[in-house]
Amino acid sequence: MDNLDYGIIGNCRSAALISNQGSIDWCCLPEFDSPSVFAKLLDDKIGGHFAINVSDDYHIDQQYYKNTGILLTIFDNGSDAFTIWDFMPRYRMDTQQFHTPPEVIRYIEHIKGKPKIKIDYQPKLEYAEGITNTYVKDDFIVSLTYHEKFDTVFLYTSFDQQKVVSGDEIVLEANGFFQLCYNEKIFAPSVEKAFLELTRTQVYWLNWNEKTPEYKKYNVQIRRSSVVLKMLCYEKTGAVLAAVTTSLPETIGEMRNWDYRFCWIRDASMVIKVISELGHKNMAKQFLKFIIDLIPDKDEKLQIMYGINKEKKLTEHTLDHLSGYMGSKPVRIGNAAYIQRQNDIYGILMDVIYEQFMKFKTEIENIEDLWTITKGIVWVVNKHWEEPDKGIWEFRTDEMHFTFSKVLCWVAVERALRVAKLLNKNRKIEKWSALEEQIRQDIHDNAWNEEKQSFTQSYGSKHLDASVLLMESYGFIDARDPKYVATVHATGRELSHDGLMYRYKNQDDFGLPSSSFTICSFWYINALNKIGEHRKATAHFDKLLSYSNHLGLFSEDLDFKTKRLLGNFPQAYSHLGLIETAINLSNFITKDEQVKENVG
């Protein structure tokens, strides 16, 4: 079964996806949201790829090098063996700036024997829209296209360039390299330089991961997910991407295909909150700078999403020449959701701002800017919280009074109150306290459904929604409150299917959802744990972890029946949910452990 069996490499400027057979099937250069160089993922005939092929007698294994973003693909047939070390260079230079060139290095380590390989190098620039021609030059291989836009990519290698391009057999007898570069190199690459880049990148990742604390359980999964989240951060601006792909379908053959190479304020804020919990405060500082730069005017309303370079207009159009992942059209670039109104983003952002005040109050730069943003958020919420919106799931037609949006409007004001208290802004406290109580009471009056014995998706609705489970996590209700306990049980009964959760079951703009949104399963497990059902939560969590791909990576969705990964990949939402759930389950103390602690 095809299970999105890919690994991700990246350097906080761009990323590439490499199959379990060692083929680069998705890569955009020079940046995450640039047109693709390889897009076999979205069209296996014309998309383009970079494969290193061997005979059928080879066993191929794949793993990450320790806790890094360096991917190893190991080829072994018993007598002959070699390893591909795939990475995108990232390390700190003497200037203290990070070296993050738009490059992929494939370092080939010869292990034993005389492996015979054939290179299948098929770059297809600009989303494969026009013809890409490839030429062998004295020092490099260059590929270029003149279709509408002019674009080039360069390949440097220690192997015979003509054999690389023609796909003729190459016998491996020593270490070698390939270096795919968006820019022509001034100084010629070499095997020795490629190895030095590899070593420096190893050191960077090992040092970065050392900051991640140890937990009682699930350390492997927490560390791998944290590296994924780091690779989804765009260092130039501080933006955090939802995923590195576009148009991987939520269900094979359907039209729920979206471009996720953007920064959603909600997703990014949730990522930053979790990554801050792991001690990686620089990412939080960079993201807050991104937010400050986006809001030049005090009365400017936030969009739900932006381009990674702070673009505000994300016009959506389709690439009709691409057949789509497993024939699932259309392939979209851009995302029309940027024009939607989603009132929950203010609370999620305000929650992150408050967390940074709490953790790093004495270190926060731009504290006045953040206080101005805090006041602006409350002003916007006060003006708009009673209006319907599109909700967390971005319904493209109906606007409703979504419970999650209302709860997060309450969160915005409640966290702003906490910040005001930290800064001794007493004049704001009285005014904002009344608004906070008004919103809280409105939710209790309108979101609870007595017949369902649950808080529901929207005011007056009978539909349940997994996002409502988060009301406890955000402090709106206590986990022991009978209404929350009842909501968890009702949501589990109605939305759980074979251990996986629906977001909701009511029909949306595209009909009844037929796949499970992965983070919703993590939310449900967290909720079970919070209401005291730790053993059940742990069993669900362990089962869910088994549905990852071979490298422990998750996409956006899971197929209910086959459990195959679906949707854009790897998904920030899924991995932040994994980390949060793993930490909560790891921190849970059983009665036996409590007795031991008391005795000790």
Image: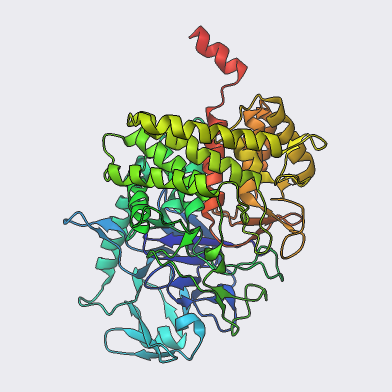
Residue 379: x %, y % from top left: 45, 46
Q: Nearer the viewer, residue 7 or 247?
A: 247
Seen as rendered, the residue at the extreme right is 451
Seen as rendered, the residue at the extreme top is 599
Q: Nearer the viewer, residue 265 or 524?
A: 265
Q: Quadrant of residue 545?
A: top right
Q: Is residue 522 positioned above or below 241 on the image?
A: above
Q: Is residue 299 positioned above or below 104 on the image?
A: above
Q: Nearer the viewer, residue 117 or 120?
A: 120
Residue 26: x %, y % from top left: 50, 71
Seen as rendered, the residue at the extreme left is 95
Judge left or right: residue 4 versus residue 28: right
Residue 557: x %, y % from top left: 64, 56
Asked if one can make out residue 184 in the rendered structure from this viewpoint, the answer is yes
Q: Is residue 97 positioned above or below 259 on the image?
A: above
Q: Residue at x 66, y 40 (%)?
A: 524
Residue 181: x %, y % from top left: 33, 75
Judge left or right: residue 213 versus residue 535: left
Asked if one can make out residue 220 in the rendered structure from this viewpoint, the answer is no
Q: Residue at x 51, y 52 (%)?
A: 267
Q: Residue at x 65, y 24 (%)?
A: 480
Q: Nearer the viewer, residue 153 or 502?
A: 502
Image quadrant holding the N terminus, namely bottom right
Q: Quadrant of residue 464?
A: top right
Colour mapping: rainbow
Judge left or right: residue 49 versus residue 492: left
